[in-house]
Structure formats: structure tokens, C-alpha cells
Amino acid sequence: MSNSKEKLDVKRLSRTFKALSNPNRLQIYLEVLAHRHSGIAAPEAGCGIADLIGKLSVGAPTVSHHVKELVDAGLVSVEKNGKFVTCHLNEAMQQQLSAFFKG
């Protein structure tokens, strides 16, 4: 791996950890991760914003803000279908985090 690639990964991981340093964002990420691994729905089904609002003690605008921060950090992606918004785990980033903590 080239030196510039290593620096890029460090910067990306730094943004990821910064996003996860907020308790609400960490909880949202854990909910999306749990939903992904629950077996309740297909992995591509994702976790609805309404589900997240119901599990956190914050309002919809706050959840939306935190989800945007997670998207910007590359942790999740969102899919809009009418008025419904679904969060999907970014599998590549989850694997990078897993490798980081195992390494």
C-alpha cells in the first residue's frame, strides 16, 4: 500500500470515529448494524428512519441530522422511497472498522 493511500485511510477512519463519537450517532449506527444482522429482513432491506426515531429519545429533525453525518462519514447510505427513508449499512466501511479493531 502506498503512503498516500495509508494517509487517505487514516483520514477516512478519523472522520468515521468523529461521527461515531456522538452518542446519538453511535446508537443509530448500532441500530442499523443490529437490524442488518438480525435476520428479520434481508440485509438490503435496511433500517427505517421511523424505526430510529421510535428507539431514540430525540425528534425527527435531530435523527435526520445525525443520519446525514453518518452518510457523510461513509458509515451508512440512505434510500428514499416517497416519504420513507431507509438506512443501509455501508458494508465496506464496516469491514474496514472490523479489520481496524482486529488488527
Image (spheres, rainbow, N blue to C red):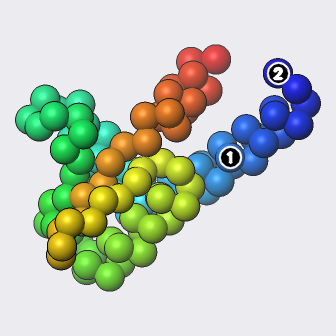
Quarter occupied by the C terminus = top right
Indicate the position of residue 75 as horizontal and vertical percent values.
48, 48
Specify whether 30 is left or right of 86. right
The furthest residue to the left: 40
Horizontally, is 1 left or right of 66 in the view?
right
Earlier residue among tags 2 and 1: 2
Mark 2: secondary structure? loop
Q: Give the alpha-carbon distance from disc 2 to disc 1, as whole Å.
A: 16 Å
Q: Which residue is drawn at 56% across and 55% down?
A: 73
38 shown above or below 15: above
Q: Quadrant of the N terminus?
A: top right
Residue hosting label 2 = 1
- Disc 1: which residue: 12
Q: Residue at x 37, y 50 (%)?
A: 29
Q: Which amino acid does label 2 sit on?
A: Met
Measuring from the top left, give residue 62's x and y in whole percent: 35, 78
Task: For residue 45, say whether it is visible.
Answer: yes
Q: Where is residue 99 in the image (x, y as percent from the top left)?
A: 57, 22
